[in-house]
Amino acid sequence: MKIIHLISGGDVGGAKTHVLSLLEGLGRTQTVRLVCFTAGAFADDAKAMGIDTLVLDGGVRSSIRALERMIQEERFDIVHCHGSRANMIGAILKRTINVPIVTTVHSDYRLDYLGRPFHRLTYGTINTISLRMFDYHIGVSDAMVQLLISRGFNPQKLFSIYNGVAFPPEKPSLSRGEYLESLGVSYDEDTVVFGIAARLNPVKDIATLIRGFAGACRKCPNIRLVIAGDGEERQMLESLAKETCPAGSVVFAGWVKDTDSFYHAIDVNMLTSLSEGAPYALVEGARMRCATIATSVGGIPYMMESGVTGLLFTPRDVETLTSYMVRLVENPAFRRKLGENFYEKAEQVYSAEATVRHQLDIYRTILRQTARPKEKRRGVMICGAYGKGNAGDEAILKAILRQLQHIDPDMPVCVLSHNPKATRLTHHVGAVYVFNPFSFLPVMRRTKLYISGGGSLIQNQTSTRSLNYYLLSIRLAKLTGNRVLMYGCGIGPVSGEGCRKSAARVIDRNVDAITLREDLSAEELKTMGVTKPKVYVTADPALLLEAGSEGAVDGFLLGNNIDPAGRYALFVLREWQGFEAKKQAFVQSAKYVKDAYGLTPIFFALEPGRDLPPSREVARELPFECPMLSAPADEKLIIGMMKKMQVVVSMRLHALIFASSVAAPLVAVSYDPKVTGFMHYIGQKHCVYFEDVTAENLCALIDGALTERSEYSVDRLRALAAQNEEIAKELLEEPI
């Protein structure tokens, strides 16, 4: 592979380090050339490192002509740009050369040249325009990718890469003891040392760190805090430490040059910032196998998995911070495990070698995509109840997208969403507003397959308007030339003879195939009179999603003040007509699991707006405190949490689906035939219709679920769910 990199040549700081390190690594296996548009230190350093470097410091026109000749004559495969001048030249080259061009976005381009109005108006404007002309963009962190998506860049042609650092680290110049003694830190073998290396300014919020440390000192006196750095808040912070912490427990080290010795000397790396990008300080600590506690801001949640590679907390939450510090002191094995886990991840993701591997993977993807023959119709449009904040529906979408990527990793996908921006950010696919035909019809004319589903879309229990919309969208998809697949669906109830006939007519005339998540839906289609599409009874695609690691789940629970070692019954309630009359049945059953089995009820909201109000109503009447959880964005945490539950009592179908994927004991309260149908399909009998719910029968069902432990085959369900992908593949391969 032959790659040419373009850069201004006056760059300093992180961008310079990233580019030079990347080129040095790529040059070991690939043909790489660096072109600078300015002579100076950058080009000199590159040459000194043995990088093939050329300086083109003439005018823009002559530089472009030279590059055109070079790229064509020497047959470079990819042009890779860095920075505003390179982006401008790359955008011009894109019109004249038949070579893919990619740019790395090293910083927020809207903030470049801040404080330099003329440069911002000229170079900043040119860069902003140029960036929009590239097909492919690389962000220097996951957070940067999210920023670009939020500004309308194509999520399916965006990649993330982190600036790599050297692994393994060299041996520090000073031992732990020597370094701590040089700072005047009093310690013994059992002392746990917390440390932070940061500017002492308000953004880093080191005041919260000191307050959290002071709280930890009251429980764990043999701990120390080393603060490395300087800044405008130093005097205030020194006074705060003197007032709140034991004498000699906090040491201010000033600016530290020997960072390897610093991180080698501490046990826990701290970062309490109110705002961050992708901080090197975390990776530097990880290189020395430090455990990490950090705020969940900016790019940090993308770098760390709470409970697995560190512990994350909300900014300024002193109470949680203190509890985390105490936990790491009292549990040395867990502390060491976090450090080892983060080291392993950092070596795999943030090392210089990993950066090079990932960059080559990006190049291969770009070359594969650009080499594909142009097709008049390609890709998939998906319609469902997406972008409404329901974790179950979002999990369905994630599962469908994963199956489509198995078929074709470069599959263009556009989702009809109630919140297109949120869908793009969450799933990294195209998305348009569900009720805007001026946006979705042009996409429909280019796609090959239209997917309606999953979930229960063909029903009018929620509203006849939604049924009519989904039927209309199916008709439009067929009229615009798509194959139509109803994917992992539930059908019904559809009430009213007119609605049933209309739905059957639309499905018969426009749908090519239907996959259903349970057999009662097949019966419903038959009674409606649907005969023409191929119908397959498979399973819900969300059954294919995996549980998160135990450490990650434990971290999620700890972050919500729930002991991962506890024994729990999960209650998933939702708003429904007549809930007030049934509330006492849920109150009594929650008391029952506590009194009879020693299980603490947890109330869990898959769709917080609808699920939290009834959960709070029930919890208020209980004589003990109960945790109240809203679904996290990561469905792996939901499934992993289900795995820890002794029993799951749910009105929500997708809570039952998540729980069934890990074979958790289930009790279903059926407000809709889809709930009953699912329980019947997987062979579970602990189910009661909502209108029939009493305290007695609900407690009896809980007894049955806990004592009978009826088994069901998770492998069988997953095998059925995998068939959805096979049928979608068949339709995509058929000529239109």
Image (cartoon, rainbow, N blue to C red):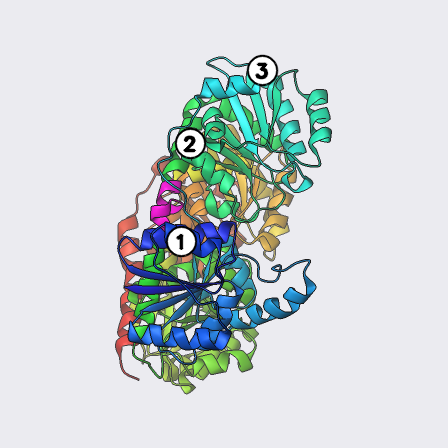
* Residue at x-position 31% and y-position 84%: 736
* Residue at x-position 35% and y-position 76%: 69
Q: Position of residue 722 (x, y in %)?
A: 29, 60
| Quadrant in the rendering for residue 100 | bottom left
Mark 3, Cα crowd under 10 Å, few <14 / some 14-19 / many 20+, is: few
Would you name the residue on which mark 3 appears? 221
Looking at the image, the residue that sits furthest to the top is 188
- Label ID, residue 288: 2
* Residue at x-position 39% and y-position 56%: 542
Magenta span includes 346: yes
Q: Nearer the viewer, mark 2 or mark 3?
A: 2
Q: Earlier in the sequence, mark 3 or mark 1?
A: 1
Q: Earlier in the sequence, mark 2 or mark 3?
A: 3
* Front position in the image: 13 or 62: 62
Would you name the residue on which mark 1 appears? 46
Q: CA distance from mark 3 to mark 1?
A: 51 Å
Question: Could you tell me if residue 116 is visible in this image?
Answer: yes
Q: Element type at marker 1?
A: helix
Magenta span includes 618: no
Question: Could you tell me if residue 646 is visible in this image?
Answer: no
Highlighted range, magenta: 345-357
Q: Position of residue 552 (x, y in %)?
A: 44, 40
Q: Nearer the viewer, mark 3 or mark 1?
A: 1
Q: CA distance from mark 1 to mark 2?
A: 29 Å
Q: Is residue 648 above or below residue 46?
A: above
